């Protein structure tokens, strides 16, 4: 069974997205030298790097958004696995896949070989904490020859080529990996743009990599500025200081001219995540009381200005198959009354956290605080930039979090998101959830290779998660990207992992 691009994974493309959402204004597949320009793109990003752009952190998406690093595969516009550093692959049996590498070089000039691929995948598997995409699988890679890699999994993984498209599994040159476990993509990627300078958490300079296997990029480079404040990002675009500004706050969107405002249906869901591992929400009756108290539909217009849909589960309208397969949630705990809430909490304040990188979240937290207080809770907010609070979130130092999550970011397959966020061993389990029924449901979905059956099992797992009240879905966002009229070829990606590629350029 020889496989190349979307022919194989049309049947395993678990994210059929709304038609026309993932588009490039330039439309080609690599400009070539004759298409290159001298213009540099100025890009304003929202979330400053946590770990110097390490692929094992949330910084990984920057490496794919700006076409710095690549994996063996990439997701195409339909969410199917397509060739990247692997030009083709063969599914030998349930646990074994063989990948043929293309001729490519790293930014430091060294060749991409099977041994380099193995080194990168082994490093990812040994990273602490492990990347979310590897929460539910263990990979073993070996070289057949310099251009061929065989990857085996401990158990069947029907979507391995989708998994390998994760930005966290980008292949970097050997010099990227330090003996102390650090990873630096500066000058070590394979994409059309090379990081030549990283200035703390504020700026990065990217230059065109002329030896890129896919042809020279049209833009000569990218100047990146991280601007955590959403209003400031919008102002940078309006004032001509940025050509592309991501995640324009909804309050600012209508202040932009219509031809610079681009709305993208998103697989992003905003939820109230409750800490089931410690604190007041170990009590399931209090979790149920919080679930009944909050009303996400109240946020759609008041906070998101209409750029959102009320949530009915973890997966929204951009995941087109989810609504028709949704499973009724049963056996939920009975909610505590307002009097019982005050008695059970003993007046102890509910520590409600959120972050400023998405401008709507602090506003949403204020609305939720009012709703929770009406149910008998005493609420104290903690609002900071995400990079300042991630460690505390993972350590369980909050009772609740107003959280915005791209549910199909890690692999394009919902199972990886569920495994990392809600299984007992999940590496991004902010809810601290440990529930055997949830674990079994997610494991069952992970082993299913039939598309329709896998989707149905994903929705059964969703129902088991919602049963615990560890998470209360609020809204499904519509992302607004700001793009100057002087730029073409920007990628509008519902999965938020692509933004600039070889065809993005100044007009």
Image: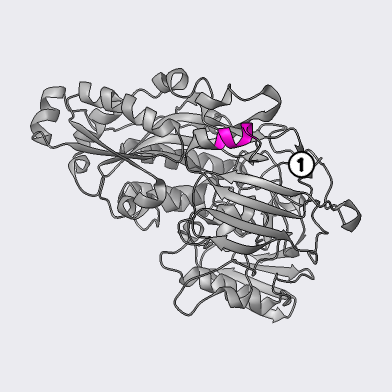
Q: Dominant secondary structure of the magenta stretch? A: helix
Q: Residue at x 46, y 37 (%)?
A: 358
Q: Is residue 266 magenta?
A: no
Name the residue rendered at 26%, 45% in the picture: 398
Count of labels in the image? 1
Q: Nearer the viewer, residue 262 or 507?
A: 507
Viewer-side residue, 209 vs 407:
209
Residue 321 makes an appearance in the image:
no
Q: Is residue 231 left or right of residue 395?
A: right
Point out the image quarter for the C terminus.
top right
Residue 113 coordinates in the image, percent (x, y) = 71, 77
Classify residue 311 as left or right of residue 343: right
Magenta stretch in the rendered image:
233-239
Residue 199 position, x and y percent, is 54, 60
Q: Quadrant of residue 295?
A: top left
Q: In which image quadrant can residue 505 be found?
A: top right
**How far across and how far down the image is residue 323, in percent?**
53, 29
- Report the quarter where the N terminus lies: bottom right
Colour mapping used in the image: one colour
Question: Residue tagged by mark 1?
Answer: 489
Q: Secondary structure at mark 1?
A: loop
Q: Is residue 87 visible?
A: yes
């Amino acid at each position: 069974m020889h496989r190349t691009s979307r022919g194989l994974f049309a049947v395993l493309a678990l994210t059929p997205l709304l038609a026309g959402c993932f588009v490039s204004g330039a439309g080609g597949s690599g400009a070539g030298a004759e298409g290159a320009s001298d213009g540099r793109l100025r890009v304003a990003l929202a979330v400053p790097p946590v770990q110097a752009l390490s692929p094992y952190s949330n910084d990984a998406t920057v490496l794919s958004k700006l076409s710095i690093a690549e994996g063996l595969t990439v997701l195409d516009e339909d969410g199917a696995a397509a060739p990247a550093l692997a030009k083709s692959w063969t599914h030998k049996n349930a646990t074994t896949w063989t990948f043929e590498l293309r001729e490519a070089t790293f930014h430091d000039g060294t060749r991409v070989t099977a041994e380099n691929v193995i080194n990168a995948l082994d490093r990812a598997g040994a990273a602490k904490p492990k990347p979310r995409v590897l929460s539910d699988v263990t990979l073993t890679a070996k070289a057949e020859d310099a251009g061929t890699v065989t990857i085996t999994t401990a158990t069947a993984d029907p979507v391995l080529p989708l998994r390998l498209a994760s930005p966290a599994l980008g292949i970097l040159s050997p010099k990227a990996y330090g003996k102390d476990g650090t990873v630096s993509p500066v000058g070590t990627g394979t994409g059309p743009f090379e990081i030549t300078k990283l200035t703390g958490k504020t700026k990065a300079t990217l230059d065109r990599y002329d030896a890129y296997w896919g042809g020279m990029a049209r833009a000569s480079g990218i100047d990146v500025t991280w601007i955590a404040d959403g209003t400031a990002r919008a102002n940078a675009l309006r004032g001509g200081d940025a050509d592309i500004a991501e995640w324009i706050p909804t309050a600012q969107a209508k202040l932009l001219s219509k031809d610079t405002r681009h709305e993208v249906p998103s697989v992003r869901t905003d939820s109230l995540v409750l800490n089931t591992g410690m604190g007041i929400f170990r009590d399931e009756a209090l979790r149920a009381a919080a679930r009944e108290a909050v009303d996400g539909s109240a946020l759609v217009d008041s906070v998101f200005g209409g750029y959102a849909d009320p949530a009915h589960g973890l997966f929204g309208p951009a995941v087109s198959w989810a609504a028709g397969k949704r499973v009724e949630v049963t056996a939920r705990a009975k909610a505590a009354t307002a009097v019982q809430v005050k008695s059970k909490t003993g007046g102890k304040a509910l520590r409600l956290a959120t972050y400023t990188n998405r401008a709507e979240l602090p506003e949403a937290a204020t609305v939720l605080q009012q709703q929770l207080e009406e149910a008998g809770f005493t609420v104290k907010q903690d609002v900071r930039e995400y990079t300042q609070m991630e460690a505390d979130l993972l350590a369980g130092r909050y009772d609740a979090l107003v959280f915005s999550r791209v549910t199909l970011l890690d692999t394009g397959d919902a199972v990886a998101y569920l495994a990392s966020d809600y299984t007992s061993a999940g590496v991004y389990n902010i809810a601290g959830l440990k529930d055997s029924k949830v674990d079994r449901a997610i494991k069952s979905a992970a082993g299913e290779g039939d598309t329709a059956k896998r989707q149905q099992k994903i929705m059964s797992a969703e129902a088991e998660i919602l049963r615990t009240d560890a998470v209360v879905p609020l809204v499904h966002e519509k992302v607004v990207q700001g793009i100057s009229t002087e730029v073409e070829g920007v990628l509008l990606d519902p999965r938020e992992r692509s933004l600039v590629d070889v065809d993005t350029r100044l007009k």
